[in-house]
Amino acid sequence: MNPPDYPMVLVVWQDPQESSPGWVDRDEFEPRLAICHTVGFLYVDDDPLTVVGSFTDSGQLSDATTIPRGCVRAIVRLDPTPQGDQPAAAATLSR
């Protein structure tokens, strides 16, 4: 295994959040989700989860982030090689 075997992606996902520490009045409570952005190599993209991580040149996986599939909002394929003065390209894969 080496990095070219897996696409480099940006995963946009929602992370559940806990209310502020301690008790809070009901009328002061504001429920919300955190929107997270994770960049790495797409190692797994299958129900029920998505895994994005880093690889060494010897194929070892590190810094793997496992995201429940239901929390994933978008997966964008990244092209890490810019063409001349153009920035790296991106294309939405799913969601």
Image (spheres, helix red, strand yellow):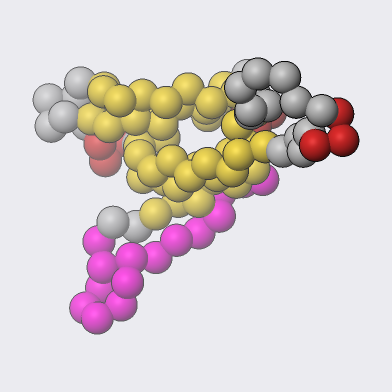
Q: Is residue 26 visible?
A: yes
Q: Quadrant of residue 26?
A: top right
Give the residue drawn at x 64%, y 42%.
Answer: 73
Q: Is residue 72 visible?
A: no
Please name whichever residue, 50 or 71, is drawn nearer the observer in this view of the structure. 71
Residue depicted at x 50% and y 59%: 91
Q: Position of residue 40 (x, y in %)?
A: 35, 39
Considering the whole magenta stretch, tell me its main secondary structure: loop
Q: Quadrant of the N terminus?
A: top left
Q: Position of residue 19 (x, y in %)?
A: 68, 26
User: Which residue is found at the position 26% from the left and 22% from the top?
Assistant: 61
Q: Residue furthest left?
A: 58
Within the image, what quadrant is residue 71 found in?
Answer: top right
Residue at the location (32% across, 72% down)?
87
94 vs 36, nearest the viewer: 36
The relative height of residue 7 versus residue 19 in the rendered view (above or below) is below
Whether the magenta-drawn stretch holds residue 85 is answered as yes
Q: Return the residue found at the far right.
A: 27
Which region is colored magenta?
81-95
Question: In the picture shown, does residue 6 fall above or below 92?
Answer: above
Q: Quadrant of the C terminus?
A: top right
Using the image, determine if residue 42 lies above or below residue 91.
Answer: above
Taking the image as shown, residue 51 lies to the left or right of residue 62, namely right
* Numbered marks: total: 0
> Left or right: where does residue 87 sit relative to residue 55?
right
- Side of 22 where 89 appears, left or right: left
In the rendered image, residue 83 lying in the magenta stretch gets the answer yes
| Quadrant housing residue 70 | top right
Q: Position of residue 8 (x, y in %)?
A: 36, 45
